[in-house]
Image: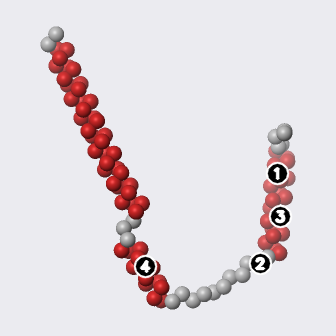
């Protein structure tokens, strides 16, 4: 199949917009007002405050774990360089 030209893309976009507008006019959105009981609001807020954020705790835990590994590897590399330096000086 051949690729769409710029004009064809514009026409297709225009058709999509017309279709969306016609659908919006046919079915109006019905919004129902529901009263929320004050007890439910308090429970939801308490749950959020008591529970630790899993996204922040997980990121922090992995950061510390990766940081320790990096420090360990860097220290090994530096000690290896120092050992090689002193070994080559004696020759």
Of mark 1 and mark 2, the one earlier in the sequence is 1
The residue at which mark 3 appears reads as 19
Of mark 4 and mark 3, the one earlier in the sequence is 3
Which quadrant of the structure image shows residue 59? bottom left
Residue 88 is marked as none
Residue 78, given in percent of the width and then of the height, sits at 24, 30
Which quadrant of the structure image shows residue 66? top left
Q: Give the CA distance from mark 1 to mark 2.
A: 27 Å
Q: Nearer the viewer, mark 1 or mark 2?
A: 2
Residue 28 is marked as 2
Residue 54, given in percent of the width and then of the height, sits at 40, 63
| Mark 4 surroundings: few (<14), some (14-19) or many (≥20) residues within 10 A | few
| Mark 3 surroundings: few (<14), some (14-19) or many (≥20) residues within 10 A | few
**Can you say whether 23 is above or below 60 in the image?**
below
Determine the secondary structure under disc 3: helix
Q: Nearer the viewer, mark 1 or mark 4?
A: 4
Q: Give the CA distance from mark 1 to mark 3.
A: 14 Å
Of mark 1 and mark 4, the one earlier in the sequence is 1
Residue 7, given in percent of the width and then of the height, sits at 85, 47
Q: Give the CA distance from mark 4 to mark 3.
A: 42 Å
**Can you say whether 57 is above or below 7 in the image?**
below
Q: Give the CA distance from mark 2 to mark 4.
A: 34 Å
Of mark 3 and mark 2, the one earlier in the sequence is 3
The residue at which mark 4 appears reads as 45
The residue at 80%/61% (across/down) is: 17
């Amino acid at each position: 199949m051949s690729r769409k030209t710029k004009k064809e893309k514009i026409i297709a976009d225009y058709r999509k917009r017309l279709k969306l507008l016609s659908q919006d006019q046919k079915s109006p959105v019905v919004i129902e007002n529901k009263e929320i009981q004050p007890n439910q609001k308090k429970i939801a807020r308490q749950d959020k405050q008591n529970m630790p954020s899993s996204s922040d705790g997980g990121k922090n835990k992995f950061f510390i774990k990766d940081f320790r590994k990096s420090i360990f590897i860097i220290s090994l590399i530096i000690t290896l360089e120092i050992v090689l330096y002193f070994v080559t000086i004696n020759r």
